[in-house]
């Protein structure tokens, strides 16, 4: 099992200095893995990232949310094609970095929709994800679809909703990506969805209810980690936190990061690494009872 941190904990700018800082600090905080947001894959220096990851013995995953010009649920075939091109580029970047996972809101735009998803929009997205999953499989990369709250997509807002969509995608190289921050808004609790998703859970984000320090909000982490233990989950677990202290031109506004919930990335990250590993150790000992 790999424990990771989202790079936005450390930097919102992915130039040479930003990539270097994020990789060094993620390793320093004690994580095994860094999740790199590829909101702008066309400018991302994959070779620099690959070299630094090797030097720091750190694994990498990548994530992104699509936008209006790359939305796979769009009724405009040119927009869907642009989304597929962008995701194909992301797959190439993950491959170049030696990574094996691409996740996030890769099935629709990441935004507040003003109407429900249409059946044609869902079908368009499911077909595109199916094609991408085949391409990804050839590169040894697995896709996970992130379940997010109703203000960030109209396609999948719950774990069970994600299972329905996975059935529409119909490809074994695609799994569910759960995030405790979004679950806290949409799900009945933090335990049942983990059991419902079961062996189709492929990726996890750990975020607090206000996206700040773990343990300082209302997310029921005890139940969530018991759920992970119960299903024998051993995939990536990645800490995600956002503050106006670290600003990304692409992500901060989309996610509504208006407040400063922390200022010291190093302290936040070290705390999260210890918190997650502590929770995992605690549920591991349940087997001894
Ligand atoms: Mn997330």
Image (cartoon, helix red, strand yellow):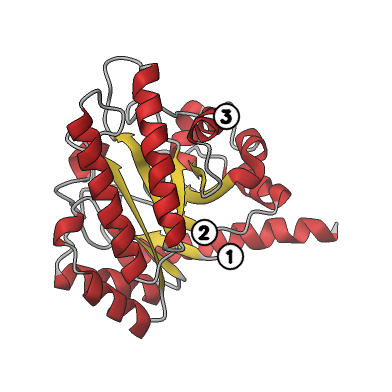
Secondary structure type for disc 3: helix
- The numbered mark, 1 or 2, whose residue comes first in the sequence reads 1
Count residues near mark 3 (Cα–Cα under 10 Å), then give few for <14, some for 14-19, many for 20+: some
**Residue corresponding to mark 3:** 160
Residue 172 x %, y %: 56, 46
Q: Nearer the viewer, residue 52 or 18?
A: 52
Furthest residue in direction bottom, as rendered: 55
Residue 107 x %, y %: 36, 37
Mark 2 vs ligand 1: CB below 8 Å:
no
- Please tell me which residue is depicted at 70% across the width and 55% down the height of the picture: 283
**Residue corresponding to mark 1:** 1
Q: Are marks 1 and 2 in contact (CB under 8 Å)?
A: yes
Q: Nearer the viewer, residue 51 or 277?
A: 51
Q: On screen, 251 above or below 18?
A: above
- The numbered mark, 1 or 3, whose residue comes first in the sequence reads 1
Where's the C terminus, which quadrant? bottom right
Measure how far apart labels 1 and 3 are at the Cα level.
24 Å
**Residue corresponding to mark 2:** 236
Measure how far apart labels 2 and 3 are at the Cα level.
20 Å
Count residues near mark 2 (Cα–Cα under 10 Å), then give few for <14, some for 14-19, many for 20+: many
Measure how far apart labels 1 and 2 are at the Cα level.
6 Å
- Please tell me which residue is depicted at 50% across the width and 34% down the height of the picture: 183
Furthest residue in direction top, as rendered: 115
Furthest residue in direction right, as rendered: 289
- The numbered mark, 2 or 3, whose residue comes first in the sequence reads 3
Where's the N terminus, which quadrant? bottom right
Please name which of the two marks, 1 or 3, marks the residue nearer to the observer.
3
Secondary structure type for disc 1: loop
């Amino acid at each position: 099992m790999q424990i990771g941190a989202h790079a936005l904990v450390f930097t919102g700018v992915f130039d040479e200095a930003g990539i270097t800082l994020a990789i060094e600090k993620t390793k320093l905080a004690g994580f095994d893995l860094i999740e790199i947001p590829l909101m702008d894959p066309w400018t991302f220096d994959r070779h620099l990232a690959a070299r630094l990851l090797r030097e720091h013995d750190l694994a990498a995953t990548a994530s992104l949310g699509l936008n209006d010009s790359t939305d796979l649920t769009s009724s405009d075939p040119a927009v869907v094609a642009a989304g597929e091109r962008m995701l194909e580029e992301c797959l190439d970047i993950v491959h170049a970095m030696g990574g094996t996972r691409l996740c996030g809101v890769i099935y629709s735009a990441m935004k507040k929709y003003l109407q429900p998803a249409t059946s044609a929009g869902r079908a368009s997205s499911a077909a595109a994800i199916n094609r991408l999953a085949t391409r990804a499989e050839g590169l040894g990369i697995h896709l996970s679809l992130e379940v997010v709250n109703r203000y960030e997509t109209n396609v999948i807002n719950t774990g069970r909703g994600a299972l329905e969509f996975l059935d529409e995608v119909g490809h074994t190289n695609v799994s569910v990506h759960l995030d405790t921050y979004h679950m806290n808004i949409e799900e009945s609790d933090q335990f049942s969805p983990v059991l419902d998703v079961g062996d189709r859970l492929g990726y996890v984000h750990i975020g607090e209810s206000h996206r700040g320090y773990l343990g300082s909000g209302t997310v029921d982490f005890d139940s969530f980690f018991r759920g992970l233990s119960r299903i024998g989950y051993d995939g990536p677990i990645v800490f995600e936190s956002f503050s106006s202290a670290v600003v990304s031109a692409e992500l901060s506004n989309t996610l509504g990061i208006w407040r400063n919930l922390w200022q010291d990335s190093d302290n936040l990250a070290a705390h999260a690494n210890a918190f997650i590993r502590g929770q995992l150790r605690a549920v591991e000992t349940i087997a001894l009872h």
